[in-house]
Image (spheres, rainbow, N blue to C red):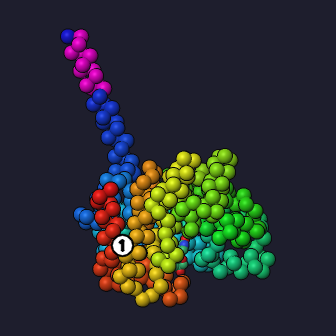
Amino acid sequence: MKVTRAAAATALAAALVLTLTTAVSAGNDNDIARGSMSEGSLGDLARRHHLRVGTAVDMNAFHNDAVYQDRIASEFSSVTAENVMKWGEIERVRGQLDFTQADELVRFARRNGQQVRGHTLLWHNQLPNWLNEGVASGEIDAAELRALLRQHIFDVAGHFKGKIYQWDVVNEVIDDNAQLRDTIFLRMLGPGYIADAFRWAHQADRGAKLYLNDYNVEGISAKSDAYYALAQQLLAQGVPVEGFGAQGHYGVQFGFHTAFGVAENLRRFERLGLETSLTEVDVRMIMPTDNPKLQAQAQGYSVLLEGCLLVRRCTSFTVWGYTDKYSWVPGFFAGQGAANILDENFNAKPAYEELRAILTLS
Ligand code: XIL
């Protein structure tokens, strides 16, 4: 009898633990729901790797092109606003916050079972004109800039509280010489502005994972070393930095890291306790395209995805647009383009097939 009771108790305890574990993991981001994604899509194939695959969304294309919009829902488990969450877009007029476009994207994501990466709370580009002009003319002094930045972070992170799983709190704060970037924030507020930004973001939204984000930091380099030192320093001061994002803007003409090189870099950030993500992946080329370039491009995408899969806490892999029909590349890099995984007609390029193969085979 005693044995039976003990066994029953054990069984009950086991059942309880099971229920509890299930309950906990059901709310855990590791269990990624299929949502609106079609079977065999990138987002669907990435589910068993506990990885979200996302895209940046161009809200103009989103409004004007139904094919573009539908494919976002069927292919991806995460979205990022390509522009509409940036300071200059949200607060064109000082004191008047316009979240219309960003809210629409967040609603779309929710309807389709997707998560939203927040991009970005602090960047030296796409700032409001009134801010740049105010600083340049001296009308806005250091104390006011600090108050404005604080208010901006509370406004935006507060508005989206509970709806963003990862925030790029600071974007591109280290320059190509591995020094803190010379911006109005560094010049007027001093290097402490980075810690302040993370603390304010944490106060405004405790749920989102707070990221450092930059380009040319996929492998180990002077620049990623500078980020490693910055992350260590912030953590030592108790600053709530939780993620390291490597943008992943590659060019075929420059060559790539190896997957192991990417993993080695991401892993050192994870050893500090951070999670990692590839946040803006695209692989541009000098136009026109040809087969060797498209194959090389596929290789560029593949080392970044494999690098991500090789480490334990790489939680999202986002492409910076998914079709060559809408890409920032031709407008920013003269003579270059075709940086995305689908062509202008939404047909799969070798890069797309390569990503699917990796997600299936690894
Ligand atoms: C780019 C957008 O894609 C463009 O539409 C916009 O005109 C400029 O910004 N690094 C970043 C992104 O962090 O925000 C940039 O996005 C691309 C480089």
The total of numbered circles placed on residues is 1
- Disc 1 marks a residue whose amino acid type is Ala
| Nearest the eye: 242 or 61 | 242
Choose top left, top right, bottom left or bottom right for residue 293: bottom left
Q: Residue at x 78, y 70 (%)?
A: 141
Q: Is residue 10 magenta?
A: yes
Q: Is residue 289 above or below residue 247?
A: below
The percent position of residue 239, horizontal first and vertical second, equals: 64, 50
Q: Secondary structure at mark 1?
A: helix
Q: Is residue 235 left or right of residue 117?
A: right
Q: Is residue 313 magenta?
A: no
**Quarter of the rendering occupied by the N terminus:** top left
Answer few, some or many: residues within 10 Å of disc 1's Cα (few below 14, many 20 plus, some between 14 and 19).
many
Choose top left, top right, bottom left or bottom right for residue 289: bottom left
The percent position of residue 23, horizontal first and vertical second, equals: 34, 41
Q: Is residue 149 left or right of residue 73?
A: right
Q: Which residue, given by chain and number where applicable, does mark 1 sit on?
A: 351
Q: Residue furthest front?
A: 292
Q: Residue at x 68, y 47 (%)?
A: 237
| Nearest the eye: 142 or 95 | 142
The percent position of residue 100, horizontal first and vertical second, equals: 47, 74
Q: Residue furthest top?
A: 1
Q: Residue at x 29, y 80 (%)?
A: 347
The percent position of residue 310, horizontal first and vertical second, equals: 42, 54
Span highlighted in magenta in the image: 2-13
| Nearest the eye: 97 or 108 | 108
Secondary structure mostly seen in magenta is helix
Q: Is residue 210 left or right of residue 129?
A: left
